[in-house]
Image: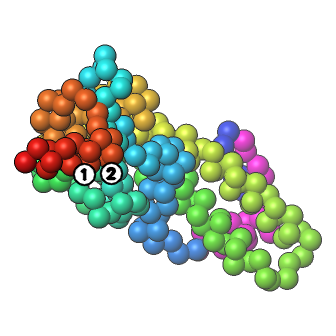
């Protein structure tokens, strides 16, 4: 039997085939698969904790810092209590039709990214199965042959991790972006596209924010309020 790992092919011994069958039998809930995909997207690829909104390209000194929620399907990865945010929709979200995704976009104050249908997280599923299998085998006694197979499986897991991040990055770059029920044209890297989406979303939610010609700090606002109270 032959197994492919990345672009390489390997002949499998009987022991390796037995290990592969045990890994294949590992039960992995879809919810766990999607949640791990979300963690990788937000923590390893995007790494966006806050968004800096600059209403005027020529005035870099005027900027506003926004916290935003980060979701994948119906699962919050970060700041789930904040309405405004970013939601990635996977194949497992339950929303497959364009009209359904537009309805979600119109209903929620979020940038919606619909991943391509072909992204089914197959490599991530295998990665998680190998990881769980190796974890369960840690305390068990093993022959030197099986020990060597487990080391190779750990190496395969590491190779899969790099491939998964690359595929998720590509999926984000080709995702369809929706805001307020309409799709948004956004080019560039995945982070640049999302920044374009968040900029458009904030502009639509706070449409008078461009009236501000000065970016006030908290201390400046408090001082201004105190001055006005004294004048009264």
Name the residue located 60 percent from the left edge and 59 percent from the top edge.
127
Query: Height in image: 197 above or below 128?
Result: above
Q: Quadrant of residue 92?
A: bottom left
Query: Height in image: 226 above or below 25?
Result: above
Residue denoted by label 2: 68
Residue 215 position within the rendered picture, expressed as x and y whole percent measured from the top left: 28, 33
Local crowd size for mark 1, using a 10 Å CA cut-off: few (<14), some (14–19), many (≥20): many
Local crowd size for mark 2, using a 10 Å CA cut-off: few (<14), some (14–19), many (≥20): many
Q: Is residue 111 visible?
A: no
Task: Looking at the picture, tell me which residue is in the foreground, 228 or 183.
Answer: 228
Residue found at the very far bottom of the displayed protein: 140
The disc label shown at residue 194, or none: none
Q: Quadrant of residue 6?
A: top right
Task: Looking at the picture, tell me which residue is in the foreground, 75 or 11.
Answer: 75
Residue denoted by label 1: 84
Residue contact at pointers 2 and 1, CB within 8 angstroms: yes
Examine the structure image and report whether residue 4 is included in the region drawn in magenta. no
Main secondary-structure element of the magenta-colored stretch: helix
Task: Looking at the picture, tell me which residue is in the foreground, 164 or 66.
Answer: 66
Question: Which region shows up in magenta?
Answer: 8-25
Residue 125 position within the rendered picture, expressed as x and y whole percent measured from the top left: 53, 60
Q: CA distance from mark 2 to mark 1?
A: 6 Å
């Amino acid at each position: 039997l032959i197994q492919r790992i990345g672009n390489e092919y390997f002949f499998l011994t009987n022991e390796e085939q037995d290990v592969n069958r045990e890994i294949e039998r590992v039960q992995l809930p879809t919810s766990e698969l999607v949640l791990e995909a979300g963690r990788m997207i937000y923590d390893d690829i995007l790494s966006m904790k806050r968004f800096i909104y600059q209403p005027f390209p020529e005035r870099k000194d005027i900027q506003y810092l926004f916290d935003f929620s980060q979701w994948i399907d119906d699962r919050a990865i970060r700041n789930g209590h904040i309405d405004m945010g970013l939601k990635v929709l996977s194949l497992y979200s339950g929303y497959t039709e364009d009209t359904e995704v537009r309805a979600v976009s119109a209903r929620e104050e979020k940038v919606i990214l619909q991943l391509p249908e072909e992204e089914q997280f197959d490599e991530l599923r295998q990665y998680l199965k190998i990881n769980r299998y190796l974890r369960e085998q840690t305390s068990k006694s093993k022959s030197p042959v099986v020990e060597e197979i487990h080391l190779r499986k750990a190496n395969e897991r590491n190779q899969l991790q790099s491939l998964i991040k690359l595929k998720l990055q590509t999926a984000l770059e080709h995702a369809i972006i929706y805001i307020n029920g309409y799709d948004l044209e956004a080019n560039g890297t995945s982070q640049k596209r999302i920044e374009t989406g968040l900029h458009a979303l904030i502009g639509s939610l706070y449409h008078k924010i461009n009236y501000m010609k000065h970016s006030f700090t908290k201390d400046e606002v408090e001082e201004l309020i105190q001055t006005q109270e004294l004048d009264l």
